[in-house]
Amino acid sequence: MSTGTDLPPTIPARAAAFLSRVPAEVRRAGGSPAARIAVAALALVLNIGFFLPSLPEGTPGVGVPGMDKLWHLLVMALTVWAIGRLLASRRRFPIGWVAIAVVLEAALVEILQGALMPGRSADPLDLLAGVIGVGGGVTAWSLERRRARGRRRAAEDETELAVDGPRA
């Protein structure tokens, strides 16, 4: 019975309802929530390297030309893909917001490296590599979702055939 004073759900209540559905939706989309969180955490830890004033001694590949571009590309791709996978359980999850956030992070990295880190320098090619990596991460995320959707449809078709029998 409504008293006329019913208020809409509060933001904490809506957030709690959302979070309670995430593990089941992640399992249905494929994979365990813990694994998705671990991969996203790894991606975020790797991003910390962009904010270090200098690279640690003995870092492999430091003297190889273009290695930093490859690093930017791979870390940004992993970041978008991993965070997208973590949040992919939402049916209409806007991967675009993740892509925008990571492109902004790539730009911020270059600005900070040029302005505040004496041992580092801003490089527009690093930014370009990061943006290309974002595109790669979105592509990987999209292909994975499409493949999972196809598997779900095939499983539903098999179930339908088993229940109804072949259609005449």
Image (tube, rainbow, N blue to C red):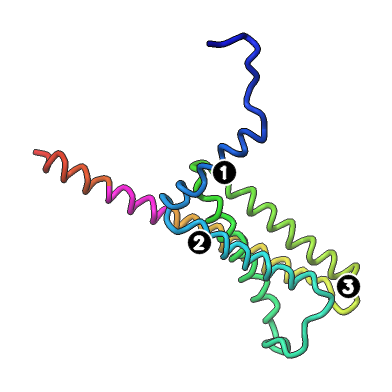
Q: Which residue is drawn at 34% across and 52% down?
A: 150
Label 1 to label 2: alpha-carbon separation: 25 Å
Question: In which image quadrant can residue 118 be found?
Answer: bottom right
Number of the label disc, if any, that sits on residue 117: 3
State yes or no: residue 156 in magenta.
no
| The magenta segment | 146-155
> Does 159 sit above or below residue 115?
above
Q: Which residue lies under the disc numbered 1?
A: 19
User: Could you tell me residue 84's position as x and y percent?
Assistant: 56, 54
Q: Is residue 91 left or right of residue 62?
A: left
Secondary structure mostly taken by the magenta-highlighted segment of the chain: helix
Q: Distance between the residues labelled 3 and 1?
A: 39 Å
**Local crowd size for mark 3, using a 10 Å CA cut-off: few (<14), some (14–19), many (≥20):** some
Instruction: Return the residue at label 2.
Output: 140
Q: Residue at x 70, y 58 (%)?
A: 103
Question: Looking at the picture, which amino acid does disc 1 mark?
Answer: Leu
Q: In this view, does 90 lie above or below 35?
A: above
User: Which corner quadrant of the image does residue 44 belong to?
Assistant: bottom right
Q: What residue type is labelled 2?
A: Ala
Q: What amino acid does circle 3 point to?
A: Met
Instruction: Give the structural element (helix, strand or loop) at label 2.
Output: helix
